[in-house]
Image (tube, rainbow, N blue to C red):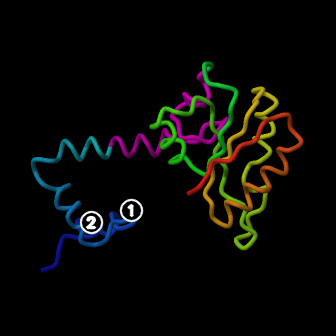
Amino acid sequence: MPLPNSFSSLVNELTVLPGVGEKTAERFAFYAISKNKKDEMLNLINALSDSINLVHECNVCGMITDSEICDICEDESRKKQLMIVDGCKSVIAFEKTGAFKGKYHILNGLISPVNGVGPDDIGLDKILERIKKEEISEIIIAIPSSMEGELTSMYLKKILSNENVKIYQIGYG
């Protein structure tokens, strides 16, 4: 039985989401069009639209925010520590623990010569600016222990060795 084009289109668009195959997309689509879920789906559409239109990277650290500077960067009570991470998900994970009271800097990727990504491509110059501007005393490198992560960590340690900061790297086990 042929399905309506709009329904098939919805299923097709849902499959672009990570981890969503055709069966899951169909299940989501049937849920979305059910009569008693229309208000929920309109709320979802509005939240998705707001996120797409309003959320962007913080001008200071790269974390997602809907203002010019994120709440973490605005927080004057944070310690003069800077944790360098590879993505927003890492910041969220560290913030959930409540253990780190410093600030973050999210790299624009990891150094990967194979993929044509060099040190100039990942925003390392912003880190050096922040160290001086915010009087950072400690740097914690918290990026993955992949080949690209190790290369990036080594490069970070090299360029930060000229700065007057203590440099730490989280352990992996």
Distance Cα–Cα, label 1 vs label 2: 9 Å
Is the residue 100 above or below the residue 144 in the image? Answer: above
Q: Nearer the viewer, residue 47 or 91?
A: 91
Q: Position of residue 120 (x, y in %)?
A: 80, 55
Is the residue 146 above or below the residue 40 in the image? Answer: below
**Magenta segment: does it hold 71?**
yes
Q: Where does the magenta region start and end? A: 46-75
Q: Position of residue 54 (x, y in %)?
A: 49, 38
**Magenta segment: does it hold 84?**
no
Of label 1 and label 2, which has the lower sequence position?
1
Pointer 2 residue: 25
Q: Nearer the viewer, residue 121 or 112?
A: 112
Q: Is residue 103 toward the left or the right of residue 4 in the image?
A: right
Q: Nearer the viewer, residue 67 or 136?
A: 136
Pointer 1 residue: 17
Name the amino acid, label 2: Ala
Query: Which image quarter holds the C terminus?
Result: bottom right
Which quadrant of the view contains residue 6? Answer: bottom left
| Whether label 1 touches label 2, CB < 8 Å | yes
